[in-house]
Image: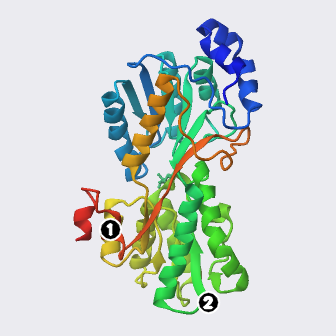
Amino acid sequence: MRTSITRGIAAAGAVVLLTLGTACSNEREGSTGTDGGDAKGFAKDSLVGVALPAKTSENWVLAGDLFTNGLKEAGFKADVQYAGASTTVADQQAQISSMVTKGAKVIVIGATDASQLSTQVAQAKQAGATVIAYDRLITNTPDVDYYIAFDNFKVGQLQGQALLDGMKAKKAKGPWTIELFSGSPDDNNSKVFFDGAMDVLKPLIDKGDIVVGSGQKNIKQTAIQGWKAENAQQRMDSLLTSTYSKKKLDGVLSPNDTLARAIITSVKGAGKPVPVVTGQDSEVESVKSIMAGEQYSTINKDTRKLVAETVNMVKSLQKGDKPEINDTKSYDNGVKVVPAYLLPPVIVTKETAAEAYANDPKLAPLTK
Ligand code: BGC
């Protein structure tokens, strides 16, 4: 519920907002997590800022155009920016500050580094903008109003289960030997994906049905900085040399498609049979690989849906309505539980690809 204090602040002018900035933050901190802040409505043609990370996977590339078109169709002015590949954090900080200066009423952020945006989102809040964390949570700040994403823990669980199913299909009984990979440590999703996967795999590891060949089981050892393909390929190369000169590798938990393809390239380069490798994002090259029987699985997180739901959130805020949320407990960012709208991810294998991508004009032809 919005409180009268929050409504009062929202109704006040910019100067008053600045003076009451701290009270406003405290008010939100003290809330139950369902308080999205100061939705009082704003002009229909207002500016909406969208700050996206570097283009580390196809989903981000797609999101940019979808936001530009979706926001314009809804009548807003859109300022959609990407962080550069090597100066990501500084780029994104500057882009968000500039959106605030230009008077954006809502700022949608796909964070490059979850914990490095508190100054910028504080500026946004003080200027009266609503901050929506898109796909990746922003941490250690009271100044994020909403989170919208696919259910990341579920993504991890689906990946863990797919790894197991794929290995069972090749060899009915364990023990199976695997390696674990996780995403970039500066992305809050990486831990959530990993925890979801370990929710399925850890009981089997504890029983000895699954063996992590290298012994590298914790998230620090498995992390791939920047979600970069070359870093994953390098780690897989070293694992193959250190552990698999004689031993057989049955499966690899890969958190996304970019890394999955890098892992497969490494294994093939070493002249080894391709193990069961999971993925995420339904990238074109990975869907082709799945259809060719190499990569085992991916996850369908339809970016068109996620962007459409985000634009719906912005429309609700414009009208002064409270946006729809369906989760008020999962995403504690270290300062507050951020009210979230989570969409269901879908696991895809060769068997289910045709059905999963039936409505996707880009992917459907690949499954024929
Ligand atoms: C997204 C994934 C993506 C990864 C790398 C994550 O935050 O949720 O879909 O594969 O970033 O870009």
Residue ID at (50%, 16%): 101
Q: Is residue 299 above or below residue 20?
A: below
> Does label 2 point to a residue whose CB lies under 8 Å from ligand 1?
no
Q: Secondary structure at mark 2?
A: loop
| Quarter the N terminus occupies | top right
Where does the image place residue 193, in percent across and percent down from the top left? 58, 60
Where does the image place residue 291, in percent across and percent down from the top left? 31, 74
Q: Is residue 24 above or below residue 12?
A: below
Q: Secondary structure at mark 1?
A: helix
Residue ID at (63%, 75%): 201
Left or right: 326 with respect to 3?
left
Rendered image: mark on residue 100: none
Amino acid type at image mark 1: Glu
The residue at which mark 1 appears reads as 355
| Quarter the C terminus occupies | bottom left
The residue at which mark 2 appears reads as 175
Where does the image place residue 127, in percent across and percent down from the top left? 58, 17
**Quadrant of res 79:** top left
Number of residues whose C-alpha sits closer than 10 Å to that of mark 1, classed few (under 14), some (14–19) or many (20 or more): few
Q: CA distance from mark 2 to mark 1?
A: 32 Å
Amino acid type at image mark 2: Pro
**Quadrant of res 7:** top right
Q: Report whether residue 206 is seen.
A: yes
